[in-house]
Structure formats: C-alpha cells, structure tokens
Image (cartoon, helix red, strand yellow):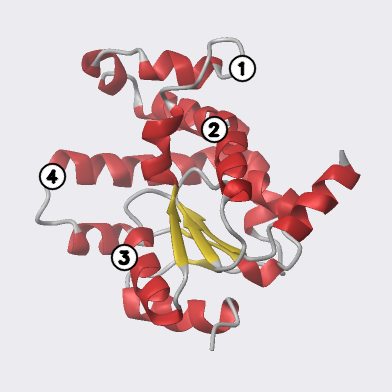
Amino acid sequence: MQDHNKILQRELTHVYWMGGSPCAGKSSIADILAATYGLSLYRADEAYFRHEKVVTPEQHPIFYKLTHYSPQELWMRSVEQQVVEEMMLYREEFPLILEELLALPRSQSILAEGAALLPESVLPFLLEPQRAIWIIPTAEFQLHHYDSLVRPPVQCCIAARETIGGGLCSGYQLQSWLPFLFSPSLVLVCSCCQVHWLHSLHPHFLLV
C-alpha cells in the first residue's frame, strides 16, 4: 500500500489541495487563485452529483444511504449525526475524487477544493506539504459574508463548526483530524478576513 501511495504521490504533484469546513469561502478563494495563476479548478462539491449516481450500498454504505433519504430525513437529523455521517460520506467519496483527478491531464496545475478533502484522506498522497491547506472559518466570518442568505442555513453551518470543534476534544471519531490539522508542516487558517487568507495562501502554495 505504501509503495502504491508513493506512486500516486508522484502522479499528483501537479495538484494543489484546499479543504476545510463548509461556509469558509473556499470556492471564492479558489476562483481568485485559479484566475491569477492559470490553475484548472476541480470542485469536489460539483463532483458529488456525479458520484451519487455511481455509489453502491456495498462499497459506499453511508453515501448511498444519504442519497436515498428524503429531504425531511436528511435535514431532521441532529447536528451531531449530520457531522459524523458527513465525515463518513467524505471518506467513502474520496477514492472517487482521486480517480477523477488522476484521469485529468497533467499539462496544467489543478486546484482541488471542497469540504470532502479531509486531511486524513489527502495526506497519504501529498508529496510536498505546501501543496495543501485547510480553512476553518470563524462564526464572525460566516455571519458577515452569508448574512444575505436565509438565516437557518447560516446558523446550521455555525452549529456544525462548533460541533466539529467540540467533537475533536470530546470523543467523536473526528479526533482523527488532530494529528493532521496541527501538523507543523501544514497551515490551518482561522480568520474572519478573506483578504488575510489570500495573503497567507500565496506564499504557502509557493505561487509567484
């Protein structure tokens, strides 16, 4: 397995990774970076709709189950259950994301962005630490930049963020994030200022 991962590391050296929680501004930042540096964008959120058509209950039990929920079943789950099952879905989906990235041309650098890009999933395929970053927004950022949206979805994002933060310290399976998020070789940006994030990302990704 390690030898296989090393091969994939070399095949993915043209990929930059940007993960983090929902409502963090990842897509907006990715648009600016792609336009500035001529990067090809891979959006995991858009890939989800392709992947939901091919998942099976045998290989992707949580992903398959959630795609067959009614809207009421999906959104009436507790925040805690939503967070845990979403993380499980992301883990099941990542091999599909990886397959698509490997199939893309290597002639142009790719910026892959989305909440599905968990640190624990990406790092085994990461040859250079500066090729990846995860962004976690503050509540102030979310309220300021999403105040024009209907308030319940915004509050849901904030509740999920707080649940993730508590889960990392209180016994959810999400504590597996800890050794990745606080690795000194990676950057975790927590800010309510999108401009500050951009200034942090340029040198981190070694973009010139």
| Residue type beneath disc 4 | Arg
| Residue type beneath disc 3 | Ser
Q: Given contact means CB atoms under 8 Å apart, are the residues at marks 1 and 2 in contact?
A: no
- Residue located beneath label 3 in the image: 28
On residue 151, the disc is: 4
Q: Identify the mark nearer the N-term, 4 or 3.
A: 3
Residue 3 visible in the current orientation? yes
Q: Could you tell me which residue is drawn at 63 percent across and 40 percent down?
A: 175
| Residue type beneath disc 1 | Gln
**Inter-mark Cα distance, 3 to 1:** 33 Å
**Inter-mark Cα distance, 4 to 3:** 20 Å
- Please tell me whether mark 1 sits on a helix, a strand or a loop: loop
**Inter-mark Cα distance, 2 to 3:** 23 Å
- Please tell me whether mark 3 sits on a helix, a strand or a loop: helix
Give percent across and percent down for residue 168: 57, 42
Nearer the viewer's eye, disc 4 or disc 3? 3
Q: Identify the mark nearer the N-term, 1 or 2.
A: 1
**Inter-mark Cα distance, 4 to 1:** 36 Å
Q: Identify the mark nearer the N-term, 4 or 1.
A: 1
Q: Quadrant of the N terminus?
A: top right
Please give left or right for residue 63 compared with residue 79 in the image: right
Q: Identify the mark nearer the N-term, 2 or 3.
A: 3
- Residue located beneath label 1 in the image: 59
Q: Could you tell me which residue is drawn at 70 percent across and 67 percent down?
A: 129
Give percent across and percent down for residue 125: 73, 52
Q: Nearer the viewer, residue 170 or 198?
A: 198
Nearer the viewer's eye, disc 4 or disc 2? 2
Please give left or right for residue 119 compared with residue 52 in the image: right
Q: Given contact means CB atoms under 8 Å apart, are the residues at marks 4 and 1 in contact?
A: no
Q: Label 3: how many residues lie within 10 Å, few (<14), some (14-19) or many (20+)?
A: few
Nearer the viewer's eye, disc 4 or disc 1? 1
Q: Label 4: how many residues lie within 10 Å, few (<14), some (14-19) or many (20+)?
A: few
